[in-house]
């Protein structure tokens, strides 16, 4: 049986408990023995990390101790899969450059609606946008068979490096109230090879409704299986 570790916490606005609970039955149905931790301290437990085949992380912002991050990086380099969605993986531990290097992409912003249309709640940042599958994505096990899909939610603007393999993108248009002068395309779904480990990042996932969108849920579930050490070893 494969071992999965679910690490959740950080900013409560992303509902880390309820969000990860959505995927626990999928993990158990696919043969994972699931362990749940509400603290990143578990990353510093070498014995646990050595036997972990897959980490699902949902920890937005927050901070991480040096020993914990070293344990996470070492585990991934040794073959443990690492995955998550939205701020739970792409906006974690902002002060840690070593974490940002591991993941390969960092949330920068989510542009909002026209200022005159804002009502001062989270929906001010909900824009209708398209997630476009790349040529690589059409052939990748995580996104194969999926077509471009539209969401109305936060549209992540991501800073990233060239070591990411981009399976889907989203493009931020230029609006009169924006200071940028040409459309910006950001990775929306990507993978990354780190040592012997596989990393999968899915940027949609602000709330439970988005996580239950059929395309988003398919990507996350396939990513869980693809990232696992048991898959990469087969």
Image (tube, rainbow, N blue to C red):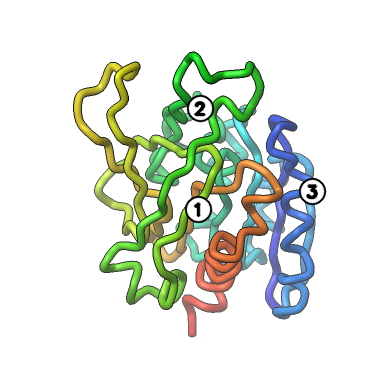
**The quadrant where residue 119 appears:** top right
Residue assigned mark 3: 18
Q: Helix or strand or loop: what does disc 2 sit on?
A: loop
Of 70 and 129, the residue lying toward us = 129
Q: Could you say which is closer to the camera, residue 161 or residue 216? A: 216
- Of the two numbered discs 3 and 2 on the same chain, state the one appearing first in sequence: 3
Answer left or right for 34 relative to 192: right
Image spot of residue 121 (x, y percent): 66, 22
Is residue 122 found left or right of 83 in the rendered image?
Answer: right
The residue to which callout 1 is attached is 202
The residue that mark 2 highlights is: 94
**In the rendered picture of this protein, how many numbered marks are placed on residues?**
3
| Residue under the image location 76 percent in, 78 percent down | 29
* One can see residue 194 in this view: no
- Would you identify the image quadrant in which residue 194 lies? bottom left
**Which of the pair 30/215 is nearer the observer?**
215
Q: Residue at x 54, y 64 (%)?
A: 215
Distance from the alpha carbon under mark 3 to that under mark 1: 17 Å
Q: Is residue 86 above or below residue 23?
A: above
Instruction: Looking at the image, tell me whether mark 3 or mark 1 is earlier in sequence order.
Output: 3
Task: Say which of 229 and 213 sits in front.
Answer: 213
> Horizontally, is 95 left or right of 185 in the view?
right
Q: Looking at the figure, which quarter contains the N terminus?
A: bottom right
Which residue is drawn at the image coordinates 47% and 25% (left, top)? 112
Q: Measured from the top left, where is residue 139 in percent x and y?
A: 33, 76
């Amino acid at each position: 049986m494969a071992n999965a570790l679910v690490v959740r916490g950080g900013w409560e606005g992303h509902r880390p408990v309820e969000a990860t609970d959505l995927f626990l039955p999928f993990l158990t149905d696919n043969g994972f023995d699931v362990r749940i931790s509400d603290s990143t301290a578990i990353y510093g437990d070498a014995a646990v990390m050595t036997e972990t085949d897959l980490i699902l992380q949902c920890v937005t912002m927050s901070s991480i101790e040096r020993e914990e991050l070293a344990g996470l990086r070492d585990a991934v380099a040794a073959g443990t899969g690492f995955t998550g969605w939205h701020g739970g993986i792409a906006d974690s531990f902002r002060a840690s450059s070593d974490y940002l290097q591991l993941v390969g992409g960092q949330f920068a912003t989510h542009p909002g609606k026209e200022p005159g249309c804002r009502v001062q709640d989270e929906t001010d940042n909900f824009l209708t946008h398209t997630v476009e599958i790349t040529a690589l994505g059409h052939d990748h096990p995580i996104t194969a068979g999926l077509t471009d899909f539209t969401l109305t939610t936060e549209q992540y603007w991501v800073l990233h490096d060239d070591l990411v393999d981009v399976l889907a993108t989203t493009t931020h248009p230029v609006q009169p109230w924006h200071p940028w002068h040409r459309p910006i395309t950001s990775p929306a779904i990507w993978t990354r090879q780190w040592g012997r480990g596989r990393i999968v990042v899915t940027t949609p996932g602000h709330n439970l409704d988005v996580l239950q969108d059929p395309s988003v849920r398919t990507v996350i579930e396939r990513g869980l299986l693809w990232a696992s050490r048991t898959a990469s070893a087969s």
